[in-house]
C-alpha cells in the first residue's frame, strides 16, 4: 500500500511526499526513508499509516510531540490501542477508518440513510465476497456496514452469522452477515434491504488495491485542512467540500 500511495502522490500536483517510514529499510525513492517515526525530520502536514498495530505507539508519539495529524489505515488494534487513539485525538486531528475506499465511505452513508428512511419493516442483510486467501470472516467492512445500519435504527448489535442450526423466523432488529471466499475476488460488499414485495440492493465492488491508496490520499488532504483536534472518519471525508484546484474557476 505504501508503494501504491507513493505512485499516486507522484501523479497529484497537490501532494508532495516529504519522507517515508519503513522498519525494514528502503531505497530508490526520491525522498528520505526512516526506520522509525522518532527519526523523522523535516516538515510534514500529516502522516499516513498502512503498516501494523505495532507501529501505533511511535506514530502517536510523533503526532503528539510535533502536532502532526495522522491517517490511520491499519486494522487490528487492541481495545487498549483504541483507547490510546481516542485519547490522542483530543490533542491532534486523527483520521481513522478500517476501509479507506471512498466508495465504501459513500456506501456507508447510503446504508445509514436507507436504514433510517425505510424503517423496521425492511429487513437488512450484508453479503461480502473476497479472494480465497483472506483469513478473516466476515470482513471488517461488512461489520462496519452492519454497525452503520444498526446504529441508524438504534438497534442493539444483534448480528447473525449463520442460520444453519436455527428453526425460526428472523428476529426484529436482526442483521444477517454472510461471507464467501474463493478465487481472486478482490472485494465485494452488498447490503440488501428486503421489504414487503420490494427489495433494494446497495453494492460496492473493489477492482484493485489502488482505491484504498486513493482514499488514504484524499483523507490526508482532508485531515491536513482540519484545524480542531478530534477523531474523524469517512463520514467527514465524503461530506468535505474540497478546496478548488489551482486554476479551477469554482
Image (cartoon, helix red, strand yellow):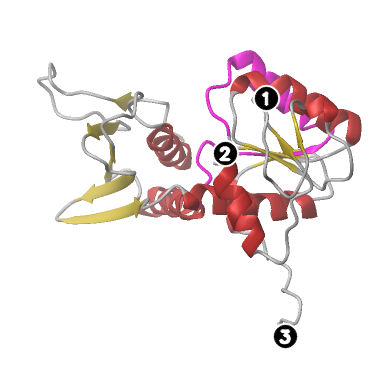
The residue segment tinted magenta is 74-101
Question: Residue 194, image x and y in percent?
Answer: 22, 48
Question: Residue 155, image x and y in percent?
Answer: 42, 32
Residue identifier under label 2: 97
**Considering only order in the chain, which callout, 1 or 2, is on the residue closer to the N terminus?**
1
- Residue 225 left/right relative to 170: right
Q: Secondary structure at mark 1?
A: loop
Question: Residue 128, image x and y in percent?
Answer: 29, 39
**Considering only order in the chain, which callout, 3 or 1, is on the residue closer to the N terminus?**
1
**Considering only order in the chain, which callout, 2 or 3, is on the residue closer to the N terminus?**
2
Residue identifier under label 1: 23
Question: Is 96 one of the magenta-colored residues?
Answer: yes
Q: Residue furthest left?
A: 167
- Residue 107 left/right relative to 96: left
Q: Secondary structure at mark 3?
A: loop
Q: Of tags 1 and 3, which is closer to the observer?
A: 1
Q: Which numbered tag is attached to residue 152?
A: none
Residue sitting at x 47%, y 42%: 152
Classify 10 Å Cα crowding around label 1: few (below 14), some (14-19), many (20 and above): few
Q: Quadrant of the N terminus?
A: top right
Residue identifier under label 3: 249
Residue 245 lies in quadrant: bottom right
Amino acid at each position: 500500500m505504501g508503494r501504491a500511495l507513493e505512485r499516486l502522490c507522484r501523479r497529484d500536483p497537490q501532494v508532495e511526499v516529504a519522507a517515508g517510514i519503513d522498519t525494514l529499510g528502503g531505497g530508490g525513492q526520491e525522498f528520505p526513508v526512516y526506520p522509525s517515526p522518532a527519526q523523522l525530520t523535516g516538515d510534514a502536514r500529516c502522516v499516513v499509516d498502512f503498516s501494523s498495530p505495532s507501529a501505533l505507539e511511535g506514530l502517536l508519539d510523533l503526532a503528539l510531540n510535533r502536532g502532526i495529524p495522522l491517517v490511520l489505515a491499519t486494522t487490528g488494534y487492541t481495545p487498549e490501542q483504541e483507547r490510546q487513539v481516542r485519547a490522542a485525538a483530543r490533542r491532534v486531528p486523527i483520521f481513522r477508518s478500517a476501509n479507506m475506499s471512498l466508495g465504501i465511505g459513500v456506501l456507508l452513508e447510503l446504508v445509514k440513510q436507507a436504514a433510517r428512511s425505510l424503517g423496521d419493516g425492511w429487513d437488512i442483510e450484508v453479503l461480502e465476497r473476497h479472494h480465497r486467501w483472506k483469513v478473516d470472516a466476515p470482513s471488517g467492512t461488512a461489520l462496519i456496514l452492519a454497525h452503520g445500519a444498526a446504529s441508524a435504527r438504534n438497534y442493539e448489535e444483534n448480528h447473525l452469522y449463520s442460520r444453519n442450526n436455527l428453526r425460526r423466523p428472523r428476529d426484529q432488529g436482526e442483521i444477517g452477515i454472510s461471507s464467501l471466499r474463493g478465487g481472486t475476488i478482490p472485494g465485494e460488499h452488498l447490503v440488501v434491504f428486503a421489504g414487503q414485495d420490494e427489495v433494494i440492493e446497495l453494492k460496492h465492488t473493489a477492482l484493485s488495491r489502488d482505491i484504498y491508496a486513493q482514499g488514504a490520499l484524499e483523507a490526508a488532504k482532508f485531515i491536513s485542512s482540519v484545524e480542531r483536534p478530534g477523531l474523524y472518519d469517512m463520514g467527514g471525508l465524503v461530506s468535505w467540500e474540497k478546496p478548488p484546484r489551482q486554476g479551477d474557476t469554482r
